[in-house]
Amino acid sequence: SQGATLAFLGTFFAIEGPLNTYARAGKLFPGPHLYAGAGLVILWAMAVSTVPKMQKGDETARTIHIGANLAGLGLFGWQVVSGVP
């Protein structure tokens, strides 16, 4: 339940951010921040898709789940640091 809520909120804000930028500026600004956000949502979807198999004990699904989340954490960390003045 907490994982589903986190996936929903992350996806919501990953879509809301570019929509807000477009509404305010009239265009998007393609760059690392936009692409990292899109990549993060893809990695979350990959991680979420492995959960049913993990619940059945599939070790490969667990490894993919952990790898996708670590890669997502790396993307997130990279963008947090780039946005700090």
Image (tube, rainbow, N blue to C red):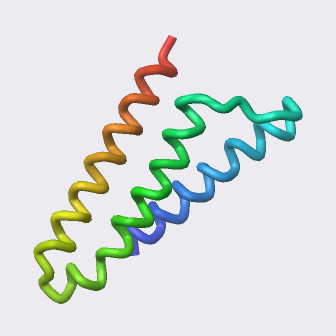
Seen in the picture, residue 75 relative to 12 is either above or below; the reply is above
**In the drawing, does residue 82 fall left or right of residue 26?**
left
Q: Residue furthest bottom?
A: 56
At 30% across and 84% down in the image, what residue appears? 52
Is 7 on the left or on the right of 24, as rendered? left
Q: Is the residue 79 above or below the residue 63 in the image?
A: above
Q: Is residue 84 left or right of residue 53?
A: right
| Residue found 45% across the figure and 29% down from its top | 79
Residue, x 45% and y 49% (percent of image)?
40
- What is the quadrant of residue 73 in the picture? top left
Q: Quadrant of the N terminus?
A: bottom left
Tally of numbered discs: 0
Residue 38 image offset from top left, x and y in percent: 54, 48
Measuring from the top left, give residue 67's x and y in whole percent.
23, 55
Q: Position of residue 32 (x, y in %)?
A: 53, 30
Front residue (pair 3, 18): 18
- Where is residue 3 shown, x and y percent of the image? 38, 67
Say above or below: 82 vs 59.
above
Judge by depth and name the residue closer to the eye, 44 or 13.
44
Q: Residue at the spot x=41%, y=38% of the render? A: 76
Q: Is residue 80 above or below residue 74?
A: above
Q: Nearer the viewer, residue 64 or 15?
A: 64
Identify the image quadrant of residue 2: bottom left
- For residue 80, what is the image quadrant? top left
